Image (tube, rainbow, N blue to C red):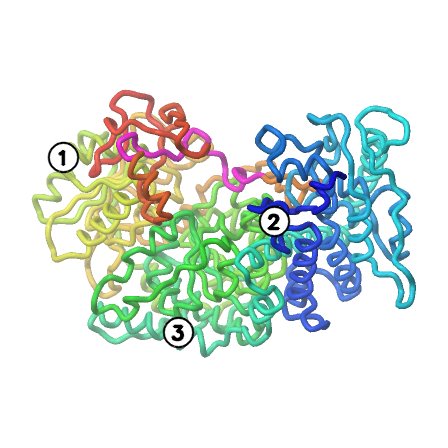
Amino acid sequence: MTAATSIILAKSTRCPTAPLPHETLMGHSSAVADSFQALFLPDGKTGWLTEQWFTFFQLSQQDHDIFLQHGLAAAWLHDLGKANNTFQAMLRHKSPGDGLNQALYHEFLSGMILSMPEAGIFFPQSLNLELLITVVMSHHLRFDRSRFAKLGVHNTFQINVPVIESLLNQAFPPPPGNPSLSLSLSKHWSFYEQPDTCQVYKIADALRYRLEKYHRRLRSDKKEVRLLRALRAALIISDSAGSGITRENKEVRDWLPPLFSKNQSLSEKEILDSVITPRISSITQKRSSSFQWSGFQEKAAELPDRTLLITPCGSGKTLAAWRWIAARLSARPASRVIFLYPTRATAAEGFRDYVSWAPESDAALISGSATFDLQGMFDNASDDRRGRSYLTEERLFALGYWSRRIFSATVDQFLGFIQNVYASICLLPLLADSVLVLDEIHSYDKGLFDALKAFLKEFNLPVLCMTASLPGDRICQLTEELGLRLFPDPVHHGDEHFPDLQERSDKERYKVTLLAGEDEALKNARQALDQGLKVLWVVNTTERCRRLAEEMKALCYHSRFRLCDRKKQHDQVIRAFQGEKQAVCAVTTQVCEMSLDLDADVLISEYAPITALIQRMGRCNRRDLPQSNRIGEVFLYKPENDLPYDKKSLSGVTSFVSALTERLVTQKDLAELLGQLGPDQYEAERWLSFINGGVNALSREESLRDGIDFMVQAVLDSDVPAYLELRKQRSPKSAGLLLPVPRQEGKRDARLPDWLHIASSENYDPNLGYGPQARKEIL
């Protein structure tokens, strides 16, 4: 090493000759080790998070010492590969390029150094070296055991042996009174055979062979697999904490322990006082009537840790879920409550209606647009929540949520870890110490449902899944294969006949009529409006939505709006249907199935999968009281094409519609027909990298849900200057200018980040959204 690189950096710095302590390799490694200890061994004792972590990952107490020993060692050693001249030159900006000018990824070099016999003198006999190396080499989620250490832009490089030696002595301190050990290793490394150098290819080949054997062993050693998952995730969150907390000039040992102590545990009383009671008060004020718990809502408090709740739309599932949460916290203490929704809009609604009643220091909304959605959410002067701030420390990223205790979030934010999404892994300390509810699970595509099943199988946590409808095969998978308790279930639990729920289920609610096509639908929509009725029209593509809304002079709501306009459209639709009895028409796409809590007199819909049709019907005659005689009019017709659905997802739809038409229909009828006609076809399980990867750890951020790769995020060309200025100001309003557009219509612009495209403003209308006039229709 030259004098210029005698200071070994771990992070980029403004002053390479006098870096801050946490920017040096030794300082950063120490901070990560401190973070691991603060999280899992506070005050030298097993912490609350350690207990929850072990329960979550299904580890035994026999794994306790192994976990702590290997976790602390990995914290000290995860970045020792940064002690090489090419990485140091990269941080000091002495080499051209964009980060590809290091000889090889530093974590790969870390593992290679640890695999060498010269390093073996530091290791205790109890060390599982393959486990340690795998955790270290995979902590950046880009590790493939068969492809690491390929030829880089540098054929030779040098390592700093003294610094590596110091890190090894920190990870494995010699016994008291013994001197530190010395590392007898050449500092010269080469991708080619040269005298007196460490041969990268030979070392890598030997390590690949070793890791291949370890990978094969993992296939039959479930205990080791769980330990590997727990350790890798623990290193990632410790690394994130050690980097983020010190960057903000906070003390790791002061900041972390209070967040994950038993004192943080939520109680049944806290949930009752801070969420349930305020929500009931809000409902009572809106209805101008007293509130009374229904029978099934009261029974929800007695349900077990794993439950599948299926009740009709509008029956009060969410309040039942909060009753279940309160009871679970009493039976099995936890410090967090997490409510997961399939979309950003439903997550925002869940936050507004329930989570936000909790103290602002506890409540959080986590979604791709949370910062924007929170703006103006409680501007009403009469709202008790007006003036509260639910924002977190932006520069701490995911760590900013660690102090919060009650969450409304999109499912991807927390379950993304199953596909090795980094930000989601950083939320695992919250998830592992939580009671979890997953709403609207009927909407999960194959990829997301596979992730849910794997999560339920591999991790131990109280989980309530709920929906208004679910195909029989999915009910079977969740109950018979994964052990969830179906509720209500009068077949197996004779006492679960709830008169109020039964009355709602048996009441004639809809009159369903089959139409010849769109022209007849237009005629019926106009007749309904002439009668002063509220009409919801749901179509399957954005283009038809825009066209019909324009033709009908109706409200338009779909996914292709700028976020700021989508928020306005959403609120406008909700207000229109909540208002006094007057004619109104909204034309929407599938987004209404979850995002819109409204009550229409008339529903017009194109054919869609059975579960989607049931959800759409749930937006018609939604507020019907059992004693009333109100009937919702439902008109169904076949669209001009099946897009965006395939034949498999539409199987049984024709028979389903035929069974409903020209008669009065109950919600019980819908559930029974779904069981008889819903799709029931085997599909291969989705590859889930956190679960199935073994030694490998590759982030698959786009793979949690089934791919929608024809859409990209964009900003209108007319909005680019405003967007850039808002970004410069770090204003959350910048997110309001984003919208999804078809990939082929998004253009690159050097002024924008790689993930963001430009779309033509000529194709955009604030009231109708984005949609070129002539192109193939897609969702």
Q: Element type at marker 2?
A: helix
Neighbourhood count class around disc 1 (C-alpha, 10 Å): few under 14, some 14–19, many 20 upward: few
Quarter location, residue 599: bottom left
Q: Is the residue 578 above or below the residue 652 in the image?
A: below
Residue 665: where, in percent of width, then height?
Answer: 29, 50
Please tell me which of labels 2 and 3 falls first in the chain: 3
Quarter location, residue 69: bottom right
**Image marks 2 and 3: residues in contact by CB distance under 8 Å:** no
Q: Which mark is residue 454?
A: 2
Please tell me which of labels 1 and 2 falls first in the chain: 2
Picture residue at 26% right of the left edge, 29% below the top: 761
Neighbourhood count class around disc 3 (C-alpha, 10 Å): few under 14, some 14–19, many 20 upward: some
**Image marks 1 and 2: residues in contact by CB distance under 8 Å:** no
Q: Which mark is residue 274?
A: 3
Residue 234: where, in percent of width, then height?
Answer: 66, 56
- Kind of residue at badge 1: Lys
Residue that numbered label 1 is attached to: 523
Q: Element type at marker 1?
A: helix
Which mark is nearer the camera, 1 or 2? Answer: 2
Q: Is the residue 694 above or below the residue 382 in the image?
A: above
Q: Nearer the viewer, residue 673 or 3?
A: 3
* Screen quadrant of the N terminus: top right
- Kind of residue at badge 2: Ala
- Indicate left or right for 316 with 628 as reference: right
Q: CA distance from mark 1 to mark 2?
A: 48 Å
Q: Nearer the viewer, residue 177 or 727?
A: 177
Which mark is nearer the camera, 2 or 3? Answer: 3
Q: Nearer the viewer, residue 175 or 340?
A: 175
Residue 220: in sight, yes or no?
yes
Residue 111: where, in percent of width, then height?
Answer: 77, 42
